């Protein structure tokens, strides 16, 4: 019994003294990683749990065609004021299920939601893109990646890459709650040379779109630091450029800071072995720091391996204040202001 409980969500954190934003989360994916017996919370339950933990804003990232459409539906629900997750978005998320979030059910561990006032939820803005690993599938690249895996196309990949990016552009133009293009970039962990060329083209198209629409850019960079930076410098980075789940070292962080690019830190900054991330965090101007979950993965220490959710950003930001040896409220205030600067009013 005790072991099974370990597999559920992290413990509820002590609420943050000043509310922050989760810079990057995939609400629609959390249901896919839950162990047997944990009921998938609705988006509404995740947003209530986030708010209760002092995470009052969330950037929902839809980075394939299906999740971008899902994100658009979620934003429309929020705009309509009918409570997110009440209809279209929820049915996509949990296959039409109507599980009540917030109640530990079965053998697993659900969300410990403590909602101050009924219906109070974190606010959501969206980011949409075709992820680099999606771009290769839309382009029909079927090479074996360095990780030894071949990715099989799904139904949505029958759409050409150009058409897929065109749909992303339409979604971005269709809602003023879409505030970023992302995650886009390059992922050489999973891609060979043909895929790399496709990813570069796709990244460039996304950069152009962010600039055209004056939106922030959220970058996915996995084993591709040099390539991503080269493209940004060649094409000119958008005004507000954010490295989501920053994975570089001190030297790269310095370069990013020189260009005014934002670095968003996820759970890995808390993992004992990742001294390079804490070093990077320590040397950049505090005004360029963001924090995120990248839920459902990358859950902060000591909950690594459990499903992640936006409320858990409170664990990460608390650990970051500890490494920086600064007051938690002060760090939260700075991150909060930066989130507003990057994404606009929520
Ligand atoms: Zn992500």
Image (tube, rainbow, N blue to C red):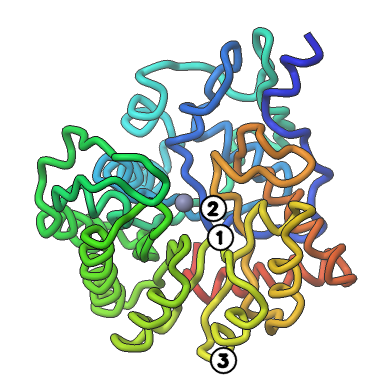
Mark 3, Cα crowd under 10 Å, few <14 / some 14-19 / many 20+, is few
Is 331 drawn above or below residue 151 in the view shown?
Answer: below
Q: Earlier in the sequence, mark 2 or mark 1?
A: 2
Of the residues under marks 2 and 3, which one precedes in the sequence?
2
In the depicted structure, whether residue 139 falls above or below residue 258: above
Cβ of disc 3 within 8 Å of ligand 1?
no
> In the picture, residue 23 is in which quadrant?
bottom right
Give the mark nearer the N terminus: 3 vs 1. 1
The residue that appears at 36% across and 64% down in the rendered structure is 186
Q: Position of residue 244 (x, y in %)?
A: 51, 63
- Viewer-nearest residue: 227 or 97: 227
Residue beneath disc 3: 258
Q: Is residue 249 above or below residue 148?
A: below
Identify the disc placed on residue 58. Answer: 2
> How much space separates mark 2 and mark 1, taking CA atoms?
15 Å
- Cβ of mark 1 under 8 Å from ligand 1: the answer is yes
Rendering coords of residue 345 (x, y %)? 49, 68
Q: Is residue 8 left or right of residue 194?
A: right
Residue at the spot of label 1: 245
Q: Residues within 10 Å of mark 2 (few under 14, many from 20)?
A: many
């Amino acid at each position: 019994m005790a072991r099974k409980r370990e597999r559920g969500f992290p413990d509820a954190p002590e609420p943050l003294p000043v509310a922050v934003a989760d810079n990057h989360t995939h609400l629609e994916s959390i249901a896919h990683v839950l162990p047997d017996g944990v009921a998938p919370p609705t988006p509404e339950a995740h947003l209530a749990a986030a708010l209760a933990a002092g995470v009052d804003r969330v950037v929902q990232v839809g980075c394939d065609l299906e999740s971008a459409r899902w994100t658009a539906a979620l934003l429309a629900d929020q705009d309509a004021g009918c409570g997110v997750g009440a209809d279209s978005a929820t049915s996509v998320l949990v296959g039409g299920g109507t599980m009540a979030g917030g109640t530990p059910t079965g053998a697993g561990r659900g969300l410990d939601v403590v909602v101050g006032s009924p219906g109070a939820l974190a606010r959501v803005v969206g980011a949409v893109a075709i992820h680099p690993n999606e771009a290769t599938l839309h382009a029909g690249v079927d090479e074996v990646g360095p990780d030894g895996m071949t990715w099989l196309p799904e139904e949505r990949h029958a759409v050409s890459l150009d058409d897929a990016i065109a749909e992303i552009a339409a979604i971005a133009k269709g809602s003023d709650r879409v505030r970023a293009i992302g995650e886009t970039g390059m992922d050489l962990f999973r891609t060979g040379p043909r895929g790399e060329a496709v990813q570069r083209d796709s990244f460039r198209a996304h950069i152009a779109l962010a600039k055209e629409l004056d939106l922030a850019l959220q970058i996915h960079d996995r084993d591709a630091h040099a390539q991503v930076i080269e493209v940004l410098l060649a094409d000119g980075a958008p005004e507000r450029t954010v490295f989501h789940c920053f994975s570089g070292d001190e030297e790269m962080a310095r370069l990013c800071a020189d260009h005014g690019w934002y670095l968003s830190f996820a759970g890995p900054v808390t993992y004992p072995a990742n001294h390079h991330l804490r070093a990077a965090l320590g040397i950049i101007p505090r005004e360029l720091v963001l924090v995120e979950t990248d839920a459902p993965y990358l859950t902060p220490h000591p909950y690594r391996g459990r499903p992640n959710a936006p409320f858990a950003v409170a664990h990460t930001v608390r650990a970051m204040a500890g490494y920086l040896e600064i007051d938690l409220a002060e760090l939260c205030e700075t991150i909060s202001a930066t989130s507003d600067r990057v994404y606009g009013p929520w």
